[in-house]
Amino acid sequence: MIIEEIKLLLDLFEAKTPDKDSNRLVWKFCNEKHRWIKAHGLHSTLRDRNMKAIKQGDKVKEAQYCFEEVVAKTLFNLTRSSAPFDPDSPYWVIKNALSLANALEIPSEKVVEIIT
């Protein structure tokens, strides 16, 4: 299931992410299915952080939050809500994971190993 791979990606990134609290928060959401319905609010929080990072020109934080945002969207959509995010959200997880790996100087092969 995609959630296990996402948690492994979050584990991979944790040591190098600039916002470790955010990384851990998203990991915790992934691990607690009963909270997925609240992932819409998590996305809003992450989006606010991302907008701040963009304004500050912090490309690494921007990459981190972009990845975490699509994870939050994916979690929320898995609840089968009547008002889901765009259905292509899960497809952005891999692209954004590769972008974050690049920003953190983690070889892309490590991401590929997790997702294959």
Image (cartoon, grey):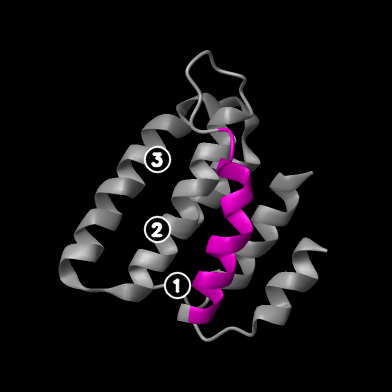
- Of marks 1 and 2, which one's residue comes earlier in the chain? 1
- Of marks 2 and 3, which one's residue comes earlier in the chain? 3
Image marks 2 and 3: residues in contact by CB distance under 8 Å? no
* Above/below status of 69 relative to 114: above
Give the magenta part as a residue range: 87-102
Type of amino acid under label 3: His
Type of amino acid under label 2: Tyr
Q: Is mark 2 on a helix, strand or loop?
A: helix
Q: Report if residue 35 is visible in the image.
A: no
Residue at image mark 2:
65
Query: Label 1, label 2: how many angstroms apart (C-alpha)?
Result: 10 Å
Residue at image mark 1:
17
Type of amino acid under label 1: Thr
Of the residues tagged 1 and 2, which is closer to the observer?
A: 2
Point out residue 17 in the picture as x, y percentages from the top left corner. Answer: 45, 72
Of the residues tagged 1 and 3, which is closer to the observer?
A: 3
Point out residue 81 in the picture as x, y percentages from the top left corner. Answer: 55, 17
- Of marks 1 and 3, which one's residue comes earlier in the chain? 1
Judge whether residue 19 is colored magenta.
no
* Above/below status of 72 relative to 104: above
Q: In which quarter of the image is residue 112?
A: bottom right
Q: Is mark 3 on a helix, strand or loop?
A: helix
Q: Residue furthest top?
A: 82
Point out residue 114 in the picture as x, y percentages from the top left corner. Answer: 76, 66
Image marks 1 and 3: residues in contact by CB distance under 8 Å? no
Residue at image position (69%, 61%) is 8
Query: Label 2, label 3: how many angstroms apart (C-alpha)?
Result: 9 Å
Residue at image position (17%, 70%) is 56
Q: What element carries label 1?
A: loop
Q: Is disc 1 surrounded by few (<14), some (14 to 19) or many (20+) residues within 10 Å?
A: many
Residue at image mark 3:
43
What secondary structure predominates along the stretch shown in magenta? Answer: helix
